[in-house]
Amino acid sequence: MVQSLEQALKQFFGYDRFRPGQRQIIEQAIKNKDLLVIMPTGGGKSLCYQLPALLKPGLTVVVSPLIALMQDQVDSLVDNGIGATFLNSSIDWQEMRSRQEQIINGKIKLLYIAPERLLTSRFIEFLDRIARKIGIATFAVDEAHCVSEWGHDFRPEYRQMIQLRRRYRKVPTIALTATATKRVRQDIIEQLGLKNAIVHISSFDRPNLYYEIRPKNNRSYQVLLNYIRNNQKAGIVYCLSRRSVDEIAFKLQKDGIKALPYHAGMEEADRTSHQNRFLRDDVQIMVATVAFGMGINKPDVGFVLHYDLPSNLERYYQESGRAGRDGEPAQCILFYSAGDTRKIDYFIEQKEDPQEQRIAKQQLNRVVDYAEGLECRRTVLLSYFGEKFAGNCGRCDNCLNPKPIEDWTIEAQKFLSCVARCKEKFGIVHIIDVLRGSKKKKVFQYGHHLLSTYGIGKDKTIAQWKVLARALLNQNLVGETTDGYRVLKLNKASWEILRKQREVHIAVNKRSDSQSLVDAYVSETEILFDRLKSLRKYIADRNSVAPYIIFADSTLKLMARSKPQNPEEMGRISGVNQYKLEQYGDRFISEIRDFCATQKPPVPLPTHSQTITLQFHQQGLNPQEIAKQRGFFPTTVYTHLSELIEMKQPVNLDRLVEKERQKIILDAIKKNGSESLKTIREHIGKSYSYDEIKLVRAWWKREQE
C-alpha cells in the first residue's frame, strides 16, 4: 500500500508526494468509509476523491454546483489521460447520449453532475443502470457547505441528496468543503446521512498568503490601480454591489488594465465568456461580486483585493482563498472603511427572520474585529474556525509592522470581573458601558450602576476597551455565544486570569496604514519561467483550454529552476506524468535548452528568512531592532543584510555604514583584497566592526560583477 499509492499518484497526476492529510483520507476512501473532509482552498481536496476513483472498481459520481467547475475539473483530468466527463445543460442531446454510452461501457471513471440533474427521475433511472452494469464506487459531494443553512452559500437542492443514501445504502459518500464551522460540519453529516463519518479537518492556515488591511478613502482607487500596475499576476477585485463592479472595471479598462466585470446582473453568456477569458489569461483582472467565487479553479491568482467589506469571515476566507492555490506566495488585501458596515447592515435588515438578522450582524461584527484588530491576522481568522495559532505569522501587516506589546493583565481582570458580575448575559458594548460608568438607561435598568466594577474603567477609552475585548476573544481568553447575540462567556482561561494564574499581553498602538512590500528580484530563473508561461499559453490557446490545464505554475517553476535537458529529467518534475511528458515534453525541453544556451548561471534569490529581514529593514528598523524583533543575534541580521546586498536586493547601505567609513573600508579592500575580514580590519583599526566591513565588502563584490 505504501509504495502503490505513491506510484499511483505519480502515474496518474505526476506528483511525487502527497500534500498534508491527503494520504490518510485516500486510505479511508479506498476502504469505503463515509468521510467529511474540511481542507482549505489549495490544499488538494479534489485528489482525495479522484485518486480513489481510479483505484476502485465502478464509477465515482461527483456532485458539483457549477458548470464552470465541472468543465475545469474534467479538462484537468482528461489532460492527464484520465477518463472523466460531465453531464449538464451546456451539451446537446446527442452529446449527452454519447457520454452516457461511454459511462455504461466503463470508459469513464469520474462523472461530474449538478445536484438538480442528479435527482431527476430520468437520471436516477440511469444511475440504477450504472449500478447494475459497472457499479457506483462513491458519491463525492464537492462544496458540501452548500447543504447547510448555517453555511455561507446555502443551496436548498443540496438537502435533497439524502435520497441517494436511502437508495444506494452501500455506496460510500465523501463530502468536501474548504470552510465549515462546527455547526456547519454537524449539519453536513446529518443532511447527507453520513454513517459513522470520519471527519478530517486540515489546518485552515494558508502559510503562502499575506493578509493586509488598508484604509478606504477617496484615494483608494488610485492605490488599487497602482497596486495592479506593479503586479503582473492575475488578480480578483471583489466589490459589494453590481454597480461598484461595473464602475471599477470601467475605470481599470480606461486606465489601461485588462479587466472584466462579473456579477449576477449580466447575461449568462457574458459571464461565461468573461470567466473563460480570465481563466485562459486573456485578461489580468476580474472585478466581481460574490457571484464570482465557488468553482474558480484558477491556481495562479496572485492577489485578491476586497474593495468593499465582506459580510462575514467565512466568506472572506473563501474569497481571499482564491489566491495562491498553487502554493506560491500571494496577497490578500482588504480596503476597510467603517462606513461599509452601514451598507451591509441595510442588506441584513431586509432579511425577514429576526434570528437570521441577529446571526448576520454577529458575523459582520467578527469581520470588523478582523479589520480593526491589532493582533496577527491569522490568529483572528483561524480562531473563527476554532483553530489556535500562536503568535507572529510573519505574513500579515500586523506581524510585519509589529506594535509594542503591553501587559494589560489588570485591565483584563477588570473586564472579565465585570462579565462575571453581569452574570455572563451581556456583550462587549454593555460591559464597556458598565466599566466606563455610562449613564445609559440599560445600565440602570439592570442595576449594573450598583456593581463594584461600575466606573472602574474610566481611564481607558471605548476604543481601548474594544481592543482589549477583541484580543481576549482572538486569544480564546473569553468565549462568546454564536446565536446572534454575542453574549460573553467566561472559560477556563478567563478564570486563570481572574485568579492571577495567567497574564494578558496585547498590542495597543495604532496600526500603520503604510506597508512596505518587497519587490521580487527578477532572476534568470524567473525570465525562463515567463518564457515557459508564454509557451504554455500558446499550446493552451491551440487546444482551447486554460493554461494551467497544461501545467501548473508550480510545475513550470520547477522546470525553470532545475532546467531538465531530456525526457528522463523532465519526467522527474512534480506535476509531469507519462501522459503529459508524451504530449508536451519535447516542446518544453526545447524551450529550456534554447534558453540555457544564451544565459549565465542564475543569481540566487533571498530565502524566506532573508526576505523578512529585508522587510524590517525597509520599514526603517536598524539591525539591532530587527534582531530583537526576530529573536536573533545582531550578527545574524548583519549576515542577512550582507547576503542581500550581494543579491542586489534593495538594502540601503548608507543607513547602515556612514559614507566616510565606507570609503575607508573600500580603500582597505582594494589594497588587501576581499578574502580576509581580519586582514582588512587590521589595516583600518579595531574601531571598525567586522559587521561594517562585511556589509561594505558585499557591496564591493556586487559591483565587481
Image: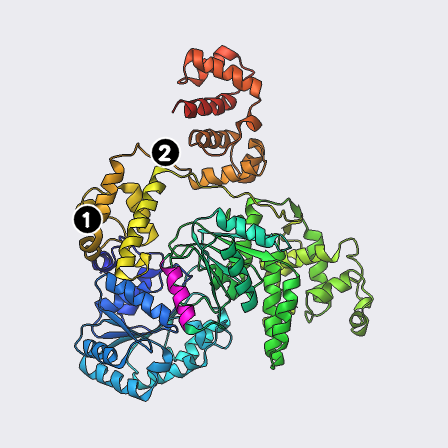
Image: 514 above or below 15: above
Q: Report the residue marked by disc 2.
A: 603
- Quarter of the image where one finds residue 423: bottom right
Q: Report the residue marked by disc 1.
A: 586
The residue at the point 58 percent across, 54 percent down is: 221
SS at circle 2? loop
Image: 654 above or below 219: above
Q: Residue 469 or 703: which is nearer the viewer? A: 703
Q: Residue 532 or 21: which is nearer the viewer? A: 532
- Quarter of the image where one finds residue 97: bottom left
Which portion, as a residue range, is magenta? 269-280
What number is the disc on residue 568? Answer: none
The residue at the point 29 percent across, 84 percent down is: 123
Q: Is residue 98 left or right of residue 204?
A: left
Task: For residue 292, say whether it is visible.
Answer: yes
Q: Which secondary structure type mostly characterizes the magenta part of the structure?
A: helix
- Tell me the amino acid under the disc marked 1: Asp
Toward the front, the furthest residue is 254
Q: Is residue 540 left or right of residue 476?
A: left
Magenta residue check for 164: no
Which percent across, then down, holds residue 205?
Answer: 46, 56
Of labels 2 and 1, earlier in sequence is: 1
Q: Is residue 499 left or right of residue 117?
A: right
In this view, the mark in front (2 or 1):
1
